[in-house]
Amino acid sequence: ERNVSGAQVYSGSGVVISGETAEKITGSTKEAMVMIYTGTKAGTCIAWSNDGGTTWHDYSGNPVANRTKGADPRDPCVFFHEPTNKWILALYENGTTLYGSDDLVEWKQLSNIDFGFECPDMFELPLDGNTDNKKWVLHDANGSYLVGQFDGVRFTPEQETLVMDVGPDFYAGQTFFRPNLPSGDVIQIAWNDHWNGGIGESPWERNATFPVKIGLVTHERKMKVTRTPIQAIKTIYQDTTTWTNKTITPQDEKDGLLKDVRAEAFDLTATFDLSDTNAGQIVFQIANKEIVYDIEKQLLLGKPLKPDDDNKLTVRMLIDWSSLEVFSAGGVFSYSEQFAFTPDDESVHLFTRGGKVALEKLQLNRVKSTW
């Protein structure tokens, strides 16, 4: 039995409710999961479950808002705004349009901002960890984002548009409904593809990025989003190997520090001291992929990245069969790419070109399969 509205189900949000709001939608005050999504050729629709997601029911009053003849407007992002005691819906509609509701059913348009393309997401974060100085972030599917204020009606940006991931494949990042998470952290997962054709995988459609905790810091006099893999990755480490105070040279390409490493899924972090080096490049060779930091041009994978103030460079990378995620500068630098690593090549190498580099520490954690 079909229990969703519309021709196709496009992306949206999931929230947990109880009491009067639940009763209006489900007929019971019992706690319920509610999905707010775009039903194409219908509009913004609701499906609900009061058995933990085992069974789902189509809300009889669908669509509840945003009627459409096709797929637009779409991608409702819904969250509860405590200061105004109402639900907020951000929608891809002539940029991003904001709606408000007391019950998830009756929606009133609040405002519009000329920003964004598909899959909006919106959340509040402390700047530099200061809970007395919180800012709102509004971002779209591309990872473009604004930082500013939200008063329950309008989003007011305080700086120009920036991008949270510089790789070729970050798209449609969405965060979890925060009240569900004990930590209250903003945890994001994105689709690791930017409509560029994939790598021939089947029957699935690309893959997801690893969950990251989103932060907000002042960096180079701007407020910037940070993306950091969640701490829980440590629970799936298979083993850990650490090297400290080594010198990396061009000769290491054939017989180097990592010559005995065999790994196809791993979490690697390396810190280099660049204060006294004559090398031109630092190269990680992972199977058939080169991950290069150009020391002179200050580029990682061709994207701008300066060393820290003390001339240290820390690079973290998560590698899996078809995904590469690289982080640096405390998460300000984030790079997501879907890549076809050679399946039978588990080699990992680290070497330089043009001279020597001091490696302070390298930690490689091989990761167990989760399925």
Image (cartoon, grey):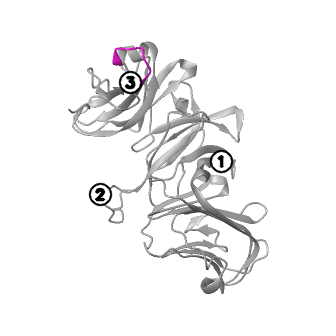
Please report the residue visible at 74 percent of the width from the left and 65 percent of the height from the top. 312
Mark 3–mark 1 Cα distance, whole angstroms, equals 44 Å
Which span of residues is magenta-colored?
A: 26-32
Q: Which residue is mark 1?
A: 222
Circle nearer the N terminus (2, 3) = 3
Q: Amino acid at mark 2?
A: Pro
Tell me: 131 left or right of 95: right
Of callouts 3 and 1, the N-terminal one: 3
Residue 62 in the image: x percent, y percent?
27, 24
Which is closer to the viewer, label 2 or label 1? 2
Q: Badge 1, how many Cα within 10 Å: few under 14, some, many 20+? A: few
Q: Badge 2 local density, few (<14 within 10 Å), some, or many (20+)?
A: few
Q: Nearer the viewer, residue 31 or 101?
A: 31
Which circle, 3 or 1, is nearer the viewer? Answer: 3
Q: Position of residue 189 (x, y in %)?
A: 48, 47
Residue matched to label 2: 203
Q: Secondary structure at mark 2?
A: loop
> Where is residue 350 drawn, in percent x and y?
63, 76
Q: Amino acid at mark 1?
A: Lys
Asked if residue 15 can be seen in this view, the reply is: yes
